[in-house]
Amino acid sequence: MFKYNIIVDKISNKIQNNELSSGAKLPSIRQLAEDFNCSKQTVSQALKVLEEQHFIYSKHKSGYYVVDKLFKENKEDNNVFDFKNASPNWADFPYSDFQHCINRAFDIYQKDLFNYNLSNGLSALIKVVQNLLYSSQVFSKEEDIFITSGVQQALNILCLMPLPNENKTILIEEPTYPQIIELLKLYNIPVVTVARKNQKLDIEKIKNIFIEYDIKFFYITSRFQNPLGFSLSKKEKIQLLNLAQKYNVYIVEDDYMADFDSNSKNDPLYTYDSSDKVIYLKSFSKIMFPGLRVGACILPPQLSSIFRHYKINADISSSVFSQAALEIYISSGMYESHIKDIRKNYTEKTKTFVDTVKRHPISKILEYLPPQALKTHIKLPKNINEKKLIDICKQDNVHLIKSDPYYFDIVDNPNHYLLIELSNISNSNIEVGTNLLLDNLEKLFF
């Protein structure tokens, strides 16, 4: 065994055994060389390995510090079952790893932090995002990728900027992402809606809407639809793209759950687009955390110039600091490692939920089992009042989402969808909470 490996093992064992606590400063390189009776170069090599393994991180002109690898999940109240909160569970994210990237961002991107001329985004981040998207079968040129202050900013710009088809009306699904609804209402933009019913996209209805109205773009989540959890089939994707090409309609594809799709054959709409009609949106809020405020927008070449103009006048450039930290996080391999961990965790959550529903006696009267997705739903029997069920469940500390904000102008729940959010609830609480919910549903039904 090489001497530097011995140093790595000794220090990593001390960290794992709490002999070196989180945030503790390591002795200087000179001191470590004396302690291990070796050269400073050998110590530096060992520290580099420890840094790559995320046991330690460096502070500029200060030294090396222990990373908090013992960050534990917050103790969840086992008597509260939250199927309402859409934010990722803070305990699922390795903050210490990202803190290390933040520290490195200060060192590496000092000049860029004082630069306004980043209308597309930090060039280094654009390159890694481009490579990252290759794995999702999204192939684009660097000049057509824009880093935005979250997907919401991209949607804001797309709603306001003119498109080559010169149309004004926007088509959305119902139910859909509440913030796009609020945005359209705020700007008083003409809107047409189409219901996502019977687990399918109503292609015939969409065709008639494209014919009857001058549709600027159709906003859609093709994978793990927000909030229902359905995904389009390949056939539906191709049918929709053919309609978009024929009737000169753009598709804004919000692929916010791309990182959680374990099906490598379930490609986004963008993959099949041969007529430059798809505008692809990539979110980092779910896989990272909403406060990062970094998203990516991939545009057809003919839209890049006008989008850049609107983007510059919206905020000059998105946070360079957040972009720099994210670039380091992705480039270092931490992002890929985090995706594997979080995908496994979330797959277990969705499977636990669906399996629990399947085992419950009430499943026999349900039209279909819930889609296996973080944002999912239960199709309620028509005689069940959604609001009454939510109120009864609240008495058992089971917290559920009201469907109203997910519809443009419908107050009642027309499709009888009980919306379920699994992002924030722990796996250990899902089975108990789901059974309480289904027990109450059973009481109301009978």
Image (cartoon, rainbow, N blue to C red):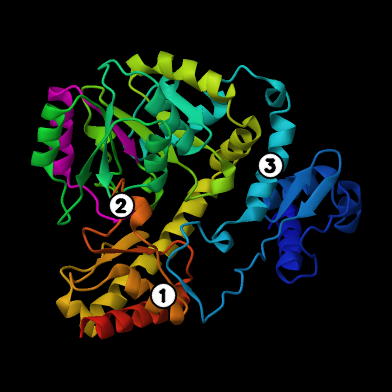
In front of the other: 168 or 110:
168
Which element is circle 2 on?
loop
Please, is residue 270 above or below residue 36 in the view?
A: above
In front of the other: 431 or 23:
431
Q: Earlier in the sequence, mark 1 or mark 3?
A: 3
- Between the residue at mark 1 and the residue at mark 3, the CA separation in whole angstroms equals 34 Å
Tell me, yes or no, if residue 53 can be seen here: no
Please, is residue 363 above or below residue 373 in the view?
A: below
Q: Earlier in the sequence, mark 3 or mark 2?
A: 3
The quarter of the picture where residue 362 lies is bottom left
Drawn side of residue 19 relative to residue 73, left or right: right
The quarter of the picture where residue 161 lies is top left
Residue 176, horizontal then vertical, whole percent: 32, 48
Let me know if residue 250 is in the magenta part: yes
What residue is pinned by disc 3? 102
What residue is pinned by disc 1? 430
The magenta-colored residue range is 227-254
Residue 206, horizontal then vertical, whole percent: 14, 37
Q: Residues within 10 Å of mark 3 (few under 14, many from 20)?
A: many
What residue is pinned by disc 2? 224
